[in-house]
Amino acid sequence: MRIGILTSGGDCPGLNAVIRGAVLKGTEINGQEFVGFKDGWRGVVNGDILPLERSNVRGIAKQGGTILGTSRTNPFEGNGGPERIQEILDANGIDAIMAIGGEGTLAAAKRLTDAGLKIVGVPKTVDNDLDATDYTFGFDTAVEIATEAMDRLRTTGDSHSRCMVAEVMGRHVGWIALHSGMAAGAHAILIPEQKTSMEQVARWVQSAADRGRAPLVVVAEGFMPDHEDDPHSERGLDAFGRPRLGGIGERLAPMIEDLTGIETRATTLGHIQRGGVPTAYDRVLATRLGMAASDIVNESAWGQMVALRGTEIVTVGFEEALGKLKVVPQHRYDEAAMLFG
């Protein structure tokens, strides 16, 4: 069986480890052959492929990014659609697609599977917001990067007696903010699941300052103060019609300064959370997911994806991944909130 692999959506530490795991298990054990689609669904629609043999994946597990390239192309737009994609597969002798991506990628994969295409999935999101899996690769790396950045912000904040605001990724959920904020000893963690007043944020900041500390506020990009109804977005929509978020930290900083009189600076970590080499945990998880994806192709489990439950790799349907987001539960936030101020 000849399988085409694609990586779609935002890049993520661990993508290359998934590719390597799938290719090694597939070629050595499952008798499969692999090609890669370049730049996500764009490569599928355009028939832009490259070979993926053992020699092509040697040593890539520790590399960040993706050797295949990625994009946020919607496979149903332009000259795409199931008929066009099936035509490309037939012309290149490709029997099935392995789609590695997040919510948008898996939603497109489900639509194409429903239209008769043979697709399996591997979940990918640094936000860790897919409900069907306990953890997604890339999340651990993003938390490590964010924590290190906050440790650095603490030293400059201490030197100038400033309040530092660190904005991290988290469109709909606050897992990165929660974990990195707790690890860095943040005095306030602001996440999309918890609407918080600016007065409460100011009280936390003032409390830390009164104890002689330089306050650290961590905010997820999708956070909304309780007086607002939509997350901050000033960069339009992506290919799937979702607002491009970012900039809430810069908006909060002057509000905090006005309310407390404490000089406040904001830093948006942005794409550095996606970059660099994956942690050991993410390399292992991604490799296991890639190997398991090769297995479910052998089982003709179309419309299914691999997932982590506890410490075991399981198989679930695309619809389970798309049913709802895995949000930060109240008790987890309450644990962190005990440390605020």
Image (cartoon, helix red, strand yellow):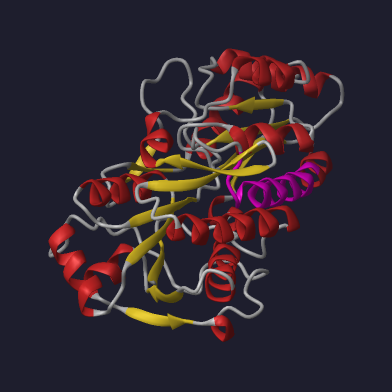
Task: Give the tally of numbered discs.
Answer: 0
Q: Which residue is more in the foreground, 34 or 69? A: 34
Q: Answer whether residue 231 is magenta in the image.
A: no
Q: Which residue is more in the foreground, 58 or 223? A: 58
Q: Pick out the residue farthest to the right.
A: 212
Which stretch appears magenta? 135-154
> Is the stretch drawn in magenta largely helix, strand or loop?
helix
Location of residue 133 in the rendering, given as x and y in whole percent from the top left corner: 55, 38
Location of residue 291 in the rendering, given as x and y in whole percent from the top left corner: 58, 61
Q: Answer whether residue 136 is magenta in the image.
A: yes
Q: On the rendered structure, is 303 left or right of 258?
A: left
Residue 81 seen by the camera: no
Quarter of the image containing the N terminus? bottom left
Quarter of the image containing the C terminus? top right
Q: Quadrant of residue 38?
A: bottom left
Kindly identify the residue that appears in the image at 78 percent across and 37 percent down.
183
Kindly identify the residue that appears in the image at 25 percent across and 71 percent down.
89
Q: Which residue is more in the foreground, 295 or 248? A: 295
Residue 21 seen by the camera: yes
Location of residue 304 in the rendering, given as x and y in whole percent from the top left corner: 41, 46
Location of residue 28 in the rendering, given as x and y in whole percent from the top left corner: 59, 75
Q: Quadrant of residue 242?
A: top left
Q: Which residue is more in the foreground, 95 or 150? A: 95
Q: Is residue 289 above or below residue 231?
A: below
Q: Pick out the residue farthest to the bottom.
A: 55
Q: Is residue 314 above or below residue 69?
A: above
Q: Quadrant of residue 47?
A: bottom left
Kindly identify the residue that appears in the image at 70 percent across and 39 percent down.
180
Q: On the rendered structure, is 150 left or right of 255?
A: right
